[in-house]
Image: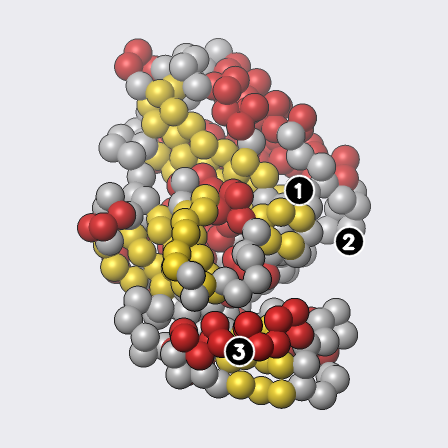
Amino acid sequence: MNDFQFHRPASLAEVFDLLESYGGDARLMAGGTALVQQMKQRLAQPGHVVSLGGLRQTPGLASIDAAADYHGAVRIGALCTHRQVETSPVVQRQIPLLAHAFRQVATPRIRNMATAGGGLVHGDPNQDPPPALIALGASVILTSAKGQRTLPVEQLFVDYFETAVRPGEVLTGILAPPLPPGAGAAYLKFLPRTADDYATVSVAVVITPGRNNTCQDVRIALGSVGMTPVHATQAESRLRGQPMTQDTLRACADAVAEEIDPLDDYRGSAGYKREMAQVFTRRALNQALAAAGQPGRPG
């Protein structure tokens, strides 16, 4: 690595001061699982590394609770490890989809270090949590010396490894709403290599059945199929309000191909990923419907 100065502030106010002082030459580090690798590969060469490890006792930054102030959403502190989210009784009870998605990340060793907020601001489109968070309609809390703002997770990702976090801002929390009443959810990850690898394709679905076997609402998000995670709104429109037959589910899944832009890499060609995105979207839709107690009827 290049030489750098290491800072360990004890408060968010100190963090904001350091970010203002060093600007673009400073990088925040929470768990360090992503930043350290980038620095070793010289993809990032900050002159100042600002550790957030000294802030774990700050209220709300490393805890998980149901936030009454946010319409019943579960608030996940940005410094919570993936393992905390995976094993949280609150998350397991209210948002099992999210517990399952975090459980798919890498290995227990990584999950015990990597943080929920650090993973998101890393901006990697191949991670497991973002599709589940997008399908749930989750938001992030971004805090600066000037105050706070919330941003839907799907708007956080701007480009490959690029997010909408502004200079001087710190991602301090995630707001994840529970499933709507009667809804079912699924997260599927296609792994042609090892169980701890990034997905070739991942899909998260939240679907709410309506009357007479129609689809009241559906949200579909995919990972590893573009420069950012993809919220497949056009595919959703093919199913929302329609009868939930295997024909309409297939039409919805096939429409995903129009919204993704996968890259060729060692996990598969772009064409292969496009086909697998359709296949796994259809499987995720059926699995989510089964979880809701209403499997799709023959079409």
Percent from the top left, x then y, of residue 24? 65, 69
Disc 1 residue crowd, few under 14, some 14–19, many 20+, Cα 10 Å: many
Residue 115: give x, y in percent of width and height: 47, 67
Q: Nearer the viewer, residue 2 or 298?
A: 2
Disc with the residue nearer the chain's start (1 vs 3): 3
Answer whether residue 130 is visible to the viewer in this image: yes
Residue 223 rendering spot, x and y as whole percentages: 59, 45
The residue shown at (67%, 34%) is: 260
Q: Closer to us: mark 2 or mark 1?
A: 1
- Calculate the distance from the C-alpha at mark 2 to the C-alpha at mark 1: 13 Å
Res. 225 mark: 1
- Which residue has dot 2 on it? 266
Residue 31 vertical placement versus 167 (above, below)? below
For this orientation, the residue located farthest to the left is 68
Q: Is residue 189 above or below residue 57?
A: above
Give the structural element (helix, strand or loop) at label 3: helix
Q: Position of residue 169 (x, y in %)?
A: 50, 62
Query: For the N terminus, which image quadrant?
Result: bottom right
Residue denoted by label 3: 18
